[in-house]
Image (cartoon, rainbow, N blue to C red):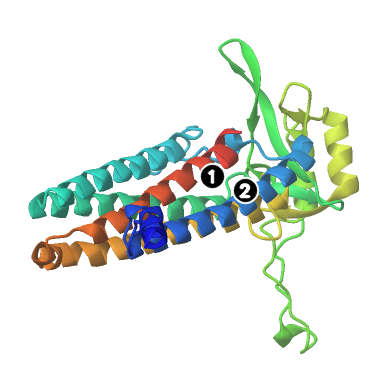
């Protein structure tokens, strides 16, 4: 008898270990397992980043765009805006959960709606950022060894000489007339060809020779933390000897900003996180309509709002780490 009493006091949790319902426990299990997945991805990114630290793209030079502000150099501004929106959506989710504890249906509805809007803005912003990253801005030449050569010139900024990027399209000279895409209809029937690059290396060489003030910048970072700019003679020599093809934008094969590995990790990790945010938005919409029709009001319990809130906070927290790794470090 005394043994049974002791065992009962030792457990004491009934069917709610740690005083949490089954649904909350399962959500915590999912969050922990998903956190380990993201940790593995970010650890792999960190190892790759430091292995190629002398040739890794500089985030301030990659993420410089802002919607509707063409030609304005705004490094990290839009990414900071996206982060602010996602964090504020986490705040509105906290307010929705608190309103649920007080069984205040109207406030839960309002704050859930604001959370959904914040999530949609973030997903849309990430889609815009992907599109901008894929299209590129200036273009570059890839060498036979896979390195990236960019173009620019020194300009005077408040009495100081600074290197300003120049787009390939602004210097390339059409030296060979119209190029013809190789297709099955005008070649071997079993041979296809990927889309033609925007310009040939020869056209870039002619353009570089015609623009005396344009220099080549390599992807190697010097002791000042800046990309290495070659002399005029070295620029021409590097392009003429090692130039392989012209690239614009970034994809899973090439990256005009530097190492292709950066683009691979960017698409995979931000895409994986974006999928989580999109899934969270869908779940929030479902819970929102259940709130509107009074499902949880009749149950006298808004625990579903709290459970989806745990997931949403996790997604926000993961973005803080992604933002730190990709954009700040």
Q: Residue furthest front?
A: 1
In the image: residue 198, left or right of residue 276 = right
Depicted 184 relative to depicted 241: above or below: below
User: Could you tell me which residue is drawn at 15 percent across and 64 percent down?
Assistant: 296
Q: Residue 166, relative to residue 127: is it above or below?
A: above
Q: CA distance from mark 1 to mark 2?
A: 8 Å
Question: Are dots 1 and 2 in contact, CB under 8 Å?
Answer: yes
Q: Earlier in the sequence, mark 1 or mark 2?
A: 2
SS for dot 1: helix
Q: Residue placed farthest to the top in the image?
A: 159
Image mark for residue 53: none
**Which is more toward the observer, 143 or 62?**
62
Residue under label 1: 322
Image spot of residue 62 (x, y percent): 59, 40
In the displayed structure, 141 sits above or below 329; it is below
Residue 222 is left or right of residue 5, and the answer is: right
- Along the line of sight, which residue is nearer the eye, 198 or 117? 117
- Quadrant where the N terminus is found in the figure: bottom left
Residue 249 can be seen, yes or no: no
Q: Secondary structure at mark 2?
A: helix
Relative image position of residue 213 (x, y in whole percent): 73, 28
The answer to whether any part of residue 151 appears in the image is yes
> Residue 44: image x %, image y %?
69, 50
Answer few, some or many: residues within 10 Å of disc 2's Cα (few below 14, many 20 plus, some between 14 and 19): some
Q: Which of the two residues, 126 or 311, is positioned nearer the viewer here?
A: 311
Q: Residues within 10 Å of mark 1 (few under 14, many from 20)?
A: some
Q: Quadrant of residue 298?
A: bottom left
Residue drawn at x 72%, y 61% is 177
Q: In the image, is residue 83 above or below residue 175?
A: above
For label 2, the residue is 42
Q: Residue at x 63, y 13 (%)?
A: 160
């Amino acid at each position: 008898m005394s043994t049974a009493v002791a065992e009962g006091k030792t457990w004491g949790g009934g069917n709610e270990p740690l005083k949490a319902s089954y649904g909350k426990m399962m959500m915590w299990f999912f969050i922990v397992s998903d956190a380990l997945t993201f940790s593995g991805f970010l650890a792999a990114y960190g190892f790759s980043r430091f292995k190629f630290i002398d040739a890794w793209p500089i985030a301030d030079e990659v993420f410089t765009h802002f919607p509707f502000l063409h030609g304005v150099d705004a490094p990290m501004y839009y990414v900071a805006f996206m982060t602010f929106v996602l964090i504020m959506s986490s705040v509105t989710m906290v307010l929705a959960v608190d309103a649920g504890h007080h069984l205040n249906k109207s406030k839960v509805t309002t704050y859930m709606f604001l959370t959904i809007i914040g999530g949609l803005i973030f997903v849309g912003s990430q889609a815009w950022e992907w599109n901008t990253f894929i299209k590129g801005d200036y273009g570059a030449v890839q060498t036979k060894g896979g390195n990236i050569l960019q173009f620019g010139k020194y300009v005077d900024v408040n009495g100081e000489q600074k290197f300003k990027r120049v787009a390939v399209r602004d210097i390339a000279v059409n030296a060979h007339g119209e190029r013809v895409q190789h297709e099955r209809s005008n070649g071997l029937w079993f041979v296809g060809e990927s889309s033609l690059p925007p310009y040939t290396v020869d056209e870039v060489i002619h353009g570089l020779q015609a623009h005396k003030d344009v220099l080549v910048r390599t992807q190697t970072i010097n002791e000042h933390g800046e990309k290495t700019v070659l002399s005029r003679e070295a620029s021409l020599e590097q392009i003429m000897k090692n130039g392989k093809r012209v690239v614009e934008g970034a994809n899973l094969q090439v990256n005009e900003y530097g190492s292709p590995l950066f683009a691979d990790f960017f698409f995979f990790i931000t895409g994986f996180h974006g999928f989580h945010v999109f899934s969270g938005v869908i779940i929030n919409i479902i819970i929102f309509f259940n709130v509107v029709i009074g499902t949880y009001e009749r149950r006298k319990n808004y625990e579903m709002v709290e459970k989806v809130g745990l997931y949403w906070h996790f997604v926000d927290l993961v973005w803080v780490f992604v933002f730190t790794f990709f954009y700040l470090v």
